[in-house]
Image (cartoon, helix red, strand yellow):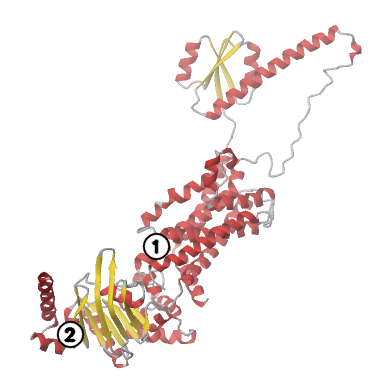
Amino acid sequence: MTTSVVSMNNVIKKFGDQVVLNGFDFEIKPGVIVGLIGPSGSGKSTVIHVLLGMEKAQSGEAFVFGNSMPNRRLLGRIGYMAQTDALYERLTGRENLQFFAEMKGIEPSLIKKQIDHVSQVVDLASDLDKRTSGYSGGMKRRLSLAISLLGDGDLLILDEPTVGVDPALRRSIWKELHRLRDNGKTILVTTHVMDEAELVDDVAMLIAGKLQEYGQPARLKEKYHEDTIENIFLKVESQNETNVSHI
Amino acid sequence: MRRTLAISKRVTLELIRDKRTLMLMFLAPILILILMKLVFSANTTVDVKIATVNVSDSLVQQIDKMKGIKTVDYGSKESARSSLNKENVDGIIQTKGNDFYVTYANTDPSKTAATKAALNSSILVNNLSDLKKALTKIQKQMPNNLGINYSSNAKPKIHNDYIYGNSKTNFFDKMLPILMGFFVFFFVFLISGMALLNERTSGTLGRLLATPVRRGEIVFGYMLSYGFVAIFQTLLIVLFTVYGLGVEVVGNIFNIVIVNVVLAFVALAFGILMSTFAKTEFQMMQFIPLIVIPQIFFSGIIPLDTMAHWVQVIAYVLPLKYSGEATTGIVMNGQSLLTVINPILILLLFLVVLTGLNIWGLKRYRKV
């Protein structure tokens, strides 16, 4: 268990009467990209919120780097990108990056270098001094990704990073994610775009509050005798429904 | 500390870039103050027209001498009454035997009061002059050695001396110290509340809380920047009222700034707290009639001791009452900070409680 970057044990999370996570178990090994897929409303974001300590599970535990969450200090080692762009629109791209770099507690002397680096990664270097209110949707998404890369965190948690992003940019974002993985980062990506699930190292299927299937795409394809993740997902989902109706 | 500074820098930068809001904070109070000065400094004498029926000539003459009062003689009550209904006159005075029967239009209470005062003093003056005449008559019939000489008894002159202001001091001057606090409270409450609401709805608060920032650092960062804004706003308002409107400030201007900055902190903490109960900016606006407006009534603009006791109790939970008390003391009586320390301490108590609530309340968005 010490080797896991992320570990969630039997997590139960309810909002009022609604059970979102119902005994969710999850492990992420270092240096892999895990794609968390599930229908919308299945609780993908809730998994992330519990991991970040924004929500506290009613029962079960969540560990990041072997430490129980919520843990404020640990957040400095996690890069997080939310579903919404969450930018200060009256500030320029550089000011946004500067602000979040300071929030992350990056050494002042290293901030400028980091800003230059992450803005190059997302190809925004030439637009950094424009106000973000004038950015296009894709540019905002890229800046948002750049912010999550600040601080060179060992774990990146990206909530739907490619929503509303054009194909060329999506390809370059994935290329960057692979490069980061090769440098030893661990990445958790949620998505509901099934062909993106082909690009990850491990696919985690969250259905009805439980981890229903987890493994390498190739291995899952073998197991279910299907040639796309999408078909596997639909199969697992319908199996789950029949299971539920049997109960 | 570094993060607190970075947050306040960011909040200030955002505010400075929002030119319209900035104008609202700095120019709107000036505009309102100018308008109020004009409105309250307008001629305060009322013009009243009174219909008289059967009133003795000497009394009518006396009433006519009163400032702003004119009489019109009517033959009958009925014709006077129809004039009153047509709003040609503001009241009717009728004499029946020894008594006076007065009918007021009463659409303007100040006119009613003026009519009452005019009638009362006219009757008094008339009686006095009757008395005087009688006295002179008696005196003439008496031997001269009594030594009373009425004609040499000159009318006494009244010399006025004002501790605060001068003869032109009016309601505006009374309201001003309280209004300064109100402007600070209103704008800081609304704008900071909106700012935090925006952080929440745009997701930047979530992103902020996904960094190792402490919840307290967020609240203090906001305080630092809005405290700064409040200093400028108060300075502008005070300097404008003193040099632009010519209002006298007896005490130290910087004491006023200190009180208002404390009030701004309270307003900020209040705004942030209330923003957690609002889902949209419009819902934030809905707090204005609930939280901002009632404070005006209890801020001391209307003297609190004239209110029913249970109503006065409400004032004790409203921050504007205490800032009003402190600034009024400084502006009108020239009191030092030490003299008005009690209301300031209570404001600080508000501040500590509200800030604590805010830091605790942010737990809704992150559990540590």
> What x and y, as percent, mark residue A209?
22, 73
Q: Please indicate whether residue A65 sits to the left or right of residue B230 in the image.
A: left
Q: Chain of mark 2?
A: A
The reply to whether residue A162 is visible in this rendering is no
* Residue B312, image quadrant: top right
Is residue B146 depicted above or below B11 in this figure? above
Residue B170 appears at what percent x and percent y? 62, 40
Along the line of sight, which residue is nearer the eye, B242 or B265? B265
| Quadrant position of residue A9 | bottom left
Q: Residue furthest left?
A: A225
Location of the C terminus of chain A (image quadrant): bottom left
Q: Which amino acid lies under the numbered mark 2 shown in the image of this protein? A: Glu
**Residue B240 pos. (x, y %):** 59, 53
At a point 59% along the width and 7% down the height, the residue shown is B97
- B357 lies left or right of A123: right
Image location of residue A21, percent across then percent down? 25, 73
Disc 2 marks which residue?
Answer: A198
For badge 1, the amino acid type reads: Leu
Relative to B237, residue A130 above or below: below
In front of the other: B62 or A152: A152
Q: Which mark is residue B88?
A: none
Question: How many callouts does the rendering have?
Answer: 2
- Residue at the image point whose x is 61% and y is 58% from the top: B345
Tell whether B131 sits left or right of A155: right
Q: Residue furthest right?
A: B145
> Which circle marks residue B197 in the picture?
1
B157 w.r.t. B325: above or below: above
Q: Secondary structure at mark 2?
A: helix
